[in-house]
Every structure is written in C-alpha cells, then in structure tokens.
Amino acid sequence: MHYLPTPVEILSVTRAAPGTISLCDQAWCRHKAGLLAYLMEEVSPVLRRGSGVHPATGLPIGMAIHAAIVACDGEQTGIGVCRAVEATLEAPLAPRDDVISHATIIEIGQRHVTCRAEAYAERVPSMQLIAAARVVLVRVQQGKAVPLFA
C-alpha cells in the first residue's frame, strides 16, 4: 500500500481573546484516513508495519492530543509537549475512518494547560466517539517545563 501523509486540517479554533489562550478556548481538527490502514498492513506473514506501537490505540489518543495542542496555539505559544494523559477508548478505529478531533482548555496553571479532548470517527451522517482524554500540556525549554507566561 502506498500512503502519502496529509497535513491535519484545522476545521475551527475558538478563542475568547485573540493572541492569548483562555479557559474554554477550543479547536476542531480533521485527520484523513489512511495511516491506520498503512500501519496495519502485513509486511510479512508474522509482522504488520505498526507492530509494537499499537496504532489502533495510539492514533486516536494522539489525534485528541493534537487538537489540544491546536487549542493552546502550540506553534505560537510553545505549549505543545504532552506531560500527562488519561484516556479511555470508547470504540474501535477502522482503518479507513477519517477522524475529527476536538479539545477544550479546562485549566491554565503556571506551568501547564489541561484540556478535555476527544477523537471521533467521522461516519456520515454522524460521528462516533473513539477516544476521550484529559491532556496536560507544557512548554519545554532545555528539557524542562517552564512557566507559560514568563
């Protein structure tokens, strides 16, 4: 199988105040199908391409984390390192599912931001919850979490 990665599509970002992050800021993203199918492909009779990393679990959780980083404007703020995550898997991700991820900022501390995040299989006409997570993000410099707004 040939797989050509595509950038994550940012569907929407809602901010209470432009240029900063605030409680209840949120982001919605779309992740195109294909990566799971590629990682599940057999490369030999006893080996799949994604063996050892459990892509059916890791991808939906990672997609939820990605939405949290977008909600925190990670490219501008540097808040983009996952310090902790607590997640539940609610349904299986099918190899050909497009995934919609969503995150909302629920706490802003001195050195961390906590987001509630979800990943949904986009199954027209509805969406099915695949994973739900509580994500703690930090900004890192020289290998250490640093104050967010210093």
Image (cartoon, rainbow, N blue to C red):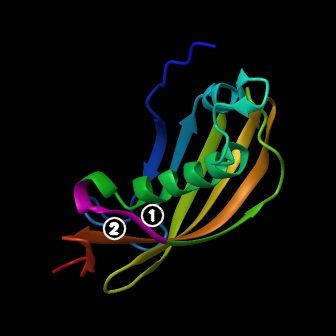
Query: What secondary structure do most residues of the magenta stretch adopt?
Result: strand
**Element marked by disc 2:** loop
**Residue occupied by mark 2:** 21
Asked whether the viewer can see residue 133, the reply is yes
Disc 2 packing (10 Å; few <14; some 14–19; many ≥20): some
Q: Which residues lie in the magenta part? A: 76-83
Q: Is residue 45 above or below residue 10?
A: above
At horizontal 77% and vertical 51% (from top left) the residue drawn is 129
Q: Residue furthest left?
A: 150
Relative image position of residue 25 (x, y in whole percent): 45, 64
CB within 8 Å, label 1 to label 2: yes
Of residues 12 and 34, the one drawn nearer to the viewer in this rendering: 34
- Distance of label 1 from label 2 (alpha carbons): 7 Å
Provide residue 150's location: percent of width, then percent of height: 15, 81
Q: Please, what is the three-letter code of the amino acid marked with disc 2? A: Ile
| Disc 1 residue crowd, few under 14, some 14–19, many 20+, Cα 10 Å | many
Residue named by callout 1: 25
Query: What amino acid does circle 1 point to?
Result: Asp
Residue at 25% in and 71% down: 143
* Quarter residue 94 falls in: top right
